[in-house]
Amino acid sequence: MSDTQSIWRSDHVIPSRPEASRHVQEELLEQLARLEWAEHDVFSVRLAMEEALINAIKHGNHYDPAKTVEVTCQIFPDRIRIEISDQGKGFDLAAVPDPTDPDNLESPCGRGIMLMRSFMSRVEFSETGNRVLLERERTPPE
């Protein structure tokens, strides 16, 4: 991973409404397409980002109109970085049930985190659990 400067950056503060997150996602996906990122990289970023935004809006801020979600997106030559913070109390990552455990197969809890981890190169939560860092390394062009 290089320490180069980002080639594109976007900072947003959005209301706690799912429809408010669409503009941020579309803006980022347009930049990835413009920079000719591989289709499977774009798919992975879209899926993980959508899960993280919904978690922040729904579970973090509980759709509270008085609370906002901060989103910072940076594209580097070799990777993308997305940071999403909500104003909720956070959560204990260790307490999230394993969605692959047979006892939890019918429960939706933990699936979003599992998807983020599956599709991104790096997923880190703050100690309080109200901020997530997502990174994906770019597939080298052919």
Image: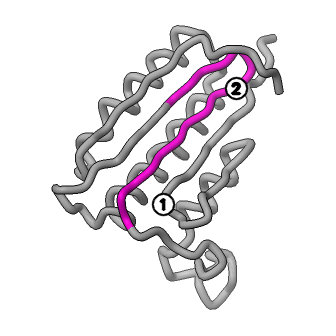
Q: Position of residue 127 (x, y in %)?
A: 61, 64
Q: Secondary structure at mark 1?
A: loop
The total number of labels drawn is: 2
Residue reaching furthest to the bottom: 103
User: Which region of the structure is painted magenta?
Assistant: 73-88
Q: Residue at x 72, y 45 (%)?
A: 122
Q: Amino acid at mark 1?
A: Asn
Mark 2 Cα-neighbour bin, 10 Å: few <14, some 14–19, many ≥20:
some
State which mark lies toward you, 2 or 1. 1
Q: Is residue 2 left or right of residue 61?
A: right
Mark 1 Cα-neighbour bin, 10 Å: few <14, some 14–19, many ≥20:
many
Q: Residue at x 66, y 53 (%)?
A: 124
User: Which of disc 1 and disc 2 is earlier in sequence?
Assistant: 2
Q: What is the C-alpha distance between the residues marked 2 and 1?
A: 23 Å
Q: Position of residue 129 (x, y in %)?
A: 54, 65
Above-or-below relation of 46 to 129: above
Q: Is residue 56 left or right of residue 91?
A: left
Quadrant holding the N terminus: top right
Quarter location, residue 42: top right
Q: Is residue 60 left or right of residue 101?
A: left
Quarter location, residue 142: top right
Q: Nearer the viewer, residue 109 or 60?
A: 60
Q: Position of residue 74 (x, y in %)?
A: 56, 25
Q: Which mark is residue 130?
A: 1
Q: Which mark is residue 79?
A: 2
* SS majority, magenta: strand
